[in-house]
């Protein structure tokens, strides 16, 4: 289930980033940051389940920061 969420959120991030780069329209940047934070959070949870605590903690902290910035920009 988590792998599906990671895949979908990563594809959304890639699509929004590509749209922004091609059209030079960055109005969807907060949404991209939100999905990027979700994607990194899921990666952190998957790493935590795989017993790699150092990488998991770094990923979860990075996702918390990205989610804070995304919510702040709304």
Image (spheres, rainbow, N blue to C red):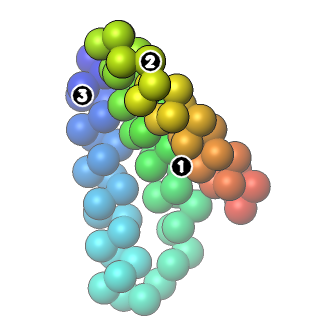
Residue found at x 30% / y 73%: 18
Left or right: residue 63 compared with residue 13: right
The residue carrying mark 2 is 53
Does residue 36 appear to the left or right of 29 in the view shown? left
Depth check, mark 1 against mark 2: the one in front is 2
Please provide percent x and percent y for residue 24. Answer: 42, 89
Q: What mark, if any, has residue 57 been given in the picture? A: none
- Circle 1 crowding by C-alpha within 10 Å: few under 14, some 14–19, many from 20: some
State the SS at label 2.
Answer: helix
- Side (left or right) of 10 relative to 74: left
Residue 59: x and y in percent read: 47, 35
Relative to 52, does residue 64 appear above or below in the rendering? below
Say which residue label 3 marks.
Answer: 4
Specify few, some or many for label 3: CA neighbours under 10 Å numbering under 14, 14-19, or 20 or more. Answer: few
The correct choice, above or below, for 56 with respect to 58 in the image is above
Q: Which residue is rendered at x = 59% and y = 35% of the image?
A: 61
Q: Secondary structure at mark 3?
A: helix
**Depth check, front residue: 36 or 15:** 36
Q: Which of the two labelled residues, at mark 2 and mark 3, occupies the earlier sequence position? A: 3
Q: Where is residue 8 shown, x and y percent of the image?
A: 28, 40
Which quarter of the figure is the N terminus placed in?
A: top left
Mark 2 vs mark 3, foreground winner is: 2
Q: Which residue is mark 1?
A: 34
Q: Residue furthest front?
A: 54
Question: Residue 64 appears at what percent x and percent y?
Answer: 62, 38
Q: Residue furthest right?
A: 72
First along the sequence among labels 1 and 2: 1
Q: Is residue 14 visible?
A: yes
Q: Residue at x 51, y 68 (%)?
A: 28
């Amino acid at each position: 289930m988590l792998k599906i969420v990671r895949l979908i959120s990563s594809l959304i991030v890639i699509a929004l980033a590509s749209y922004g780069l091609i059209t030079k329209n960055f109005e969807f940047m907060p949404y991209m940051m939100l999905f990027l934070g979700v994607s990194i959070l899921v990666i952190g949870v998957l790493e935590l389940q795989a017993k790699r605590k150092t990488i998991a903690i770094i990923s979860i902290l990075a996702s918390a920061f990205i989610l804070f910035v995304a919510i702040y920009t709304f």
